[in-house]
Amino acid sequence: MITEKEQAGIDALVFGPTIEQVDAATLGEWLGLTPNRISALARDGVIPRTADKRFDLQVAIRAYCDHARAGSVGRRVDSELAAEKLRAAKATAEKLETANAKARGELAALSAVEREWAGILGDVRAALLALPSRAASRLGHLTPHDVKTLDREVRAILEELADD
């Protein structure tokens, strides 16, 4: 006598593959998912259900694989989006750090620094140009020739610094 299982095997060989219907727990075992996740995928229309709330095993596995493949393409796009979001977050953080440094007085505007240094260097230049006449008034033994020599040297030094 042939058992029911053997008969099913013979029928599968003779009449083609039978579509096995399974419940959410069995399908979950096949896919490595919980029954709740299987039900959620069915509610979302990812995995089709039969009228009696069961799943055609082959159809459900194929549908889940298609869904997983589509998701992997989406993740690739999502990773590019994530990289852009990370870049934007870093830029925002840098902007905030700069604003905080300004508020603490640790950072000054470039134009203000340039104005300050221009003023300082103008004062240094004026003091150096005044050096020969100040030396002549304090050092009475200097001749007009000595004062002119000092003036030429100071101007030569300033020109060298301006060239650099």
Image (tube, rainbow, N blue to C red):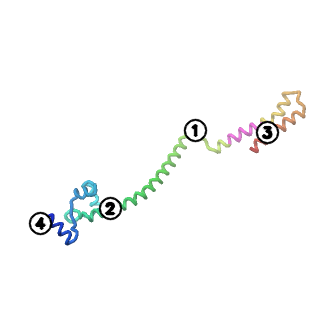
Which mark is first along the chain, 3 or 4?
4
Which mark is first along the chain, 2 or 1?
2
Cα separation, mark 4 vs mark 1, equals: 91 Å
- The nearer-to-camera label among 3 and 2 is 2
Q: Quadrant of residue 146?
A: top right
Q: Could you tell me the amino acid type at mark 4?
A: Ile
- Depth check, front residue: 74 or 151: 74
Disc marking residue 150: none
Q: Could you tell me the amino acid type at mark 3?
A: Ile
Disc marking residue 2: 4
- Depth check, front residue: 18 or 46: 18
Cα separation, mark 1 vs mark 2, equals: 57 Å
Cα separation, mark 3 vs mark 2, equals: 80 Å
Residue 113 falls inside the magenta stretch: no
Residue 145 percent coordinates (x, y): 90, 34
Q: What stretch is highlighted in magenta?
A: 115-126
In the image, is residue 117 above or below residue 63?
Answer: above
Disc marking residue 65: 2
Taking the spot 18% from the left edge, 66% from the top edge, the residue there is 9
Which mark is first along the chain, 2 or 3?
2
- The nearer-to-camera label among 4 and 3 is 4
The reply, left or right, for residue 39 in relation to residue 81 is left
Residue 14 percent coordinates (x, y): 19, 72
Q: Are marks 4 and 2 in contact (CB under 8 Å)?
A: no
Disc marking residue 106: 1
Taking the spot 21% from the left edge, 59% from the top edge, the residue there is 23
Cα separation, mark 3 vs mark 1, equals: 34 Å
Q: Can residue 39 be seen in this view?
A: no
Circle 3 residue: 157
- The nearer-to-camera label among 1 and 2 is 2
